[in-house]
Image: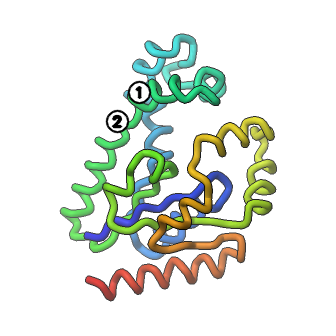
Amino acid sequence: MIKIGLTGSIGMGKSTTANMFAAAGVPVHDADATVHALYAGRAAPLIEAAFPGTVVDGRVDRKRLSPHVLGKPEVMKRLEAIVHPLVRKEEEAFLTAARLARRRIVVMDIPLLFETAGENRVDIAVVVTADADIQKQRVLARADMTKDRFQAILERQMPDGEKRRRAHFLIDTGLGMELARRQVRAILRALAACQ
């Protein structure tokens, strides 16, 4: 089974690209969606214990958690030490199910693939990218986004140029979604030919 690690900085179109892989019939494990589920479940009491006042009605309130961790690398590491092992367990369960279903290719949608050494858990790294101006425009159009928050997120992420350098394949969403869809299909054809 070939494990694709799909990554890309904020606003690059990674989620849209993950949906393209799913539409092509490839199982996708979404690390962000897993975190959201954990914030409403098993991780909530652990995070409340570490960051009192951040859980409301049994789920982590990201707006309350954010001031504790954004721009504070050491504090962020404490949060990651709670969340990442739980995400890994969910990832392992996904991979086990995919193996049992005899899937030939799976996608691991991991926003911080390189930042967390996640490339060591996958076979192929696919980086979703776009021009920096397009990225900024997309991100700042989000209702809950500010320039300061965008900057804090960028500082946590590896620069796009470095991600591109480490990639086995690139998908450029800045050139339009139809071209990105064709790039996804080309990657799947290339990988199928290797099996």
Circle 2 residue: 86
Earlier residue among tags 1 and 2: 1
Q: Residue 6 at what x, y percent from top left?
A: 47, 62
Q: Left or right: where does residue 61 sit relative to residue 79?
A: right
Q: Position of residue 36 (x, y in %)?
A: 50, 38
User: Contact, CB < 8 Å: mark 1 with mark 2?
Assistant: yes
Q: Residues within 10 Å of mark 1 (few under 14, many from 20)?
A: many
Q: Could you tell me which secondary element the residue under label 1 belongs to? A: helix
172 vs 39: above or below:
below
Whether residue 49 is situated above or below residue 194 in the rendered picture: above
- Residue 120 falls in image quadrant: bottom left
Q: Quadrant of residue 103?
A: bottom left
**Residue positioned 42% across, 45% down in the render:** 116
SS class, disc 2: helix
* Three-letter amino acid code at the position of disc 1: Ala
| Residue type, mark 2 in image | Leu
Image coords of residue 64 (percent x, y): 63, 21
Residue 43, label in figure: 1
Name the residue at 49% across, 82% down: 185
Is the residue 61 above or below the residue 32 in the image? above
| Residue 54 in which image quadrant | top right
Residue furthest to the left: 100
Identify the residue at horizontal 57%, vertical 83% (top origin).
Answer: 182
Name the image quarter holding the N terminus: bottom left
The picture places residue 195, in percent across and down from the top left corner, at 26, 83
Viewer-nearest residue: 120 or 96? 120
